Amino acid sequence: MKASHKYSLYFFVPLILIWGGTYFFSGPKEIVQTRVESTIPQVISYNFDVKPILSDKCYACHGPDAEARQAELRLDLAEGAFKTAKYLSDMPIISKGDPEGSALIYHIRSTDAERQMPPPSSNLLLSERQKEILSKWIEQGALWEEHWAYQIPKRSSPPSITFDSWAINQIDLFIAKRLEVQNMKPSAPASKETILRRLAFDLTGLPPSIELMDQFLTDSSDKAYEKMVDHFMSLPQFGEHMASSWLDVARYADTHGYQDDLERIMWPWRDWVIHAFNKNLPYDEFISWQLAGDLYENPSLEMLVATGFNRNHKITQEGGVIDEEYRVEYVADRTITTSKALMGLTVECARCHDHKYDAVSQKEFFSLYSFFDKVDEKGRIEYGETPSPFIVVDKEIVAKELTFMHLPDSIEKVELMVMKEEPDIRSTYTLKRGVYDAPDQEVFPATPESVLAFDGGYVPNRKGLANWFFDANNPLTSRVIVNRYWQQFFGRGIVSTPDDFGNQGARPTHPKLLDWLATTFRTTDKWDSKQFIKRLVMSATYRQSSKRIADYELQDPENKYLSYYPRQKLTAEMVRDNALATSGLLNMTIGGPSVKPHQPEGLWEETTSGQGLTRYTPDTGSNLYRRSLYTFWKRTVPPPNMMTFDASSRDFCSVERQKTSTPLQSLVLMNDPQFYNAAQHISKKIEKLSLSNQDKIVVLFRQITLRKPLSGEVEMLKRYFDDLTLEKDTDQAFTNLAVLIYNLDETTQKS
């Protein structure tokens, strides 16, 4: 590493602490503020007020898990909650309208350690507010409701609001109504520079060009913004960006995982995902082909490629393992991935015993598991073996049937893992404690009854399961995907636990909006993702400024009600791609095999033993600067700079990434060769301009941030540049200045 490069740390940290403070600090107000406990609702809702208390404090001993249940008392079902308390002198557990005559209230109010609930030994204490809610609910008649997520979504009419001139579409009416209830108002629109940059990243994962920005700034027509929306959605980069999120869900990687972690060929499936998003394959087909493309009548080769989704799990080639043990793990992985991705349920909790919090029994887990159990596959593969079943794709097939696949000239053919149903290959059993060699009772394809019974003529295979997911009466499929789309564009889902729509998950902040979106996507849009996404980004809610409103911080510290657009960091892929794109280094080639950009030397050697991928050899030339979507992903040693910026490990299905701010992120931006090369490349272009140094600084700042710096910012940057030129030549000073700008909080934020 060059000494001048290391020296940049000395200069940059003070400015980063000032300019990019949110990397290191949360802000003084957030540290000292005390959140005001909300008042007890006037009308108590079972689903939104009572059930969360029972789920958190009571279900562990009085919930769905029969083995853990105490005193033969079950509080997750109405028939259990309203029966007579067997061990308390025939007192009703819940007596509608009579809190004092309810055993539940008696026990939670008791100071006797022998009678108090939850028992002191559990460390699950009820607050006075929670006790009051339970008492008031019973006083109001103890109205029982089915779990909100298992009720079929209903499309209510958008509400009327007092500041309807702000609203652009129906989404805004729901958001504005909730703000009205909270005595809050939405924010002013973001500046044109800010909103175009936000929109470009959200729809393509890349910044807009300066030329496009200038075109938008001078377009004063009413359709200026909508034209940009349509433009970005028409680009092939839209499919690449949408695929990036789906790779997390599908646990895509370029290696098998486990100890030796050998390379696998799955990138043709990734090419298909990009293609599917770009041609706007309806969501129901997008999912159904991946679940069961092989089970359609006369399936196309494209449908078979899509089923690679099911084979993205880890596979072992280690000697000495028990074949059946690992085969069972693969089937369980497919079951858990499908459930989390499409139902938002933690069914893995029912693998060893009935779910402790949700109405999913162990039998139901293995009934769901049985859909994915009819594949002729091995638990352990040989070194260099492509796990069966697979298809062979060569250049002729690509030219005739799979034109979306990018098979380079250097590769004659590839073997891609897919699904192939073998209906009579084996029977499926529940496994005691989830262990592979402890079969119990035989099970057959079925789904959790609490969600939707698997009857009504479904074929008992993965194709029938796909049809079940898109049944008009399935309450989860549309809710789960629109919630994840909302999360993608607003940083947080309407349900903030996208992987858990069950009893332990968060309740929706805007339940009527969630159901309106779910029903609109299914019925009006007919699963058209582009049309649905356009509705989101066209809304006034999306176009708000991200400037915080101080008066609302105590009332809504997490901005759940969206009184301003939530500030969000760029994803790991966007951070790197932004540097490459604004510098002019980005290679825009679409599809094909994964590539190896720079990473620390010796990392694979230090962390790999035995056979396998033991040496990392970076690519050369423009392949060093492909989009991050195509970075080679070794499961046991994922790309370190991507992991620093919270990328998913791809070991398992992930529907939400962590959100961290650490000094390591700034150190990567300052010292990783990829970012340094970007800074060097853009500085050379700026240096060649026939402008004064101050004007060059303005151009450099705008090229990276896409806005013109304020006069005070120009002065600060010029002082820093002048300090650098005292000890460095001008070229190096511009490079260091570019590194600083790439490290700004503003540069690494979406808005």
Image (spheres, helix red, strand yellow):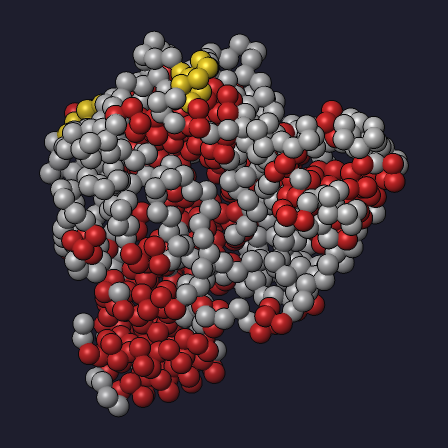
The x and y percentages for residue 264 are 21, 36
The picture places residue 236, in percent across and down from the top left corner, at 35, 43
Q: How many marks?
A: 0
Q: Residue at the spot x=38%, y=36% of the render?
A: 250
Q: Nearer the viewer, residue 205 or 326?
A: 326
Q: Is residue 252 above or below residue 20?
A: above
Residue at 26% from the left image edge and 65% from the top image edge: 672
> 289 left or right of 626?
right
Q: Which residue lies furthest to the bottom in this view?
A: 726
Residue 507 quadrant: top right
x, y (%) of residue 97? 88, 35
Q: What residue is shown at x 23% (from left), y 42% (from top)?
A: 259
Compared to residue 468, the image places residue 643 above or below, namely: below
User: In the rendered image, which quarter is residue 586 located in?
Assistant: bottom left
| Residue pictured at 66% horizontal, 65% vertical | 553
Q: Nearer the viewer, residue 429 or 699?
A: 429
Q: Out of 276 and 13, give the one closest to the viewer.
A: 13
Residue 401, horizontal then vertical, whole percent? 25, 24
Q: Nearer the viewer, residue 468 or 243?
A: 468
Is residue 526 in view? no
Answer whether residue 388 is visible to the viewer in this image. Answer: yes
Q: Is residue 244 above or below residue 469?
A: below
User: Left or right: where does residue 430 sit relative to residue 303?
Assistant: right
Is the N terminus in the top left, top right, bottom left or bottom right quadrant? Answer: bottom left
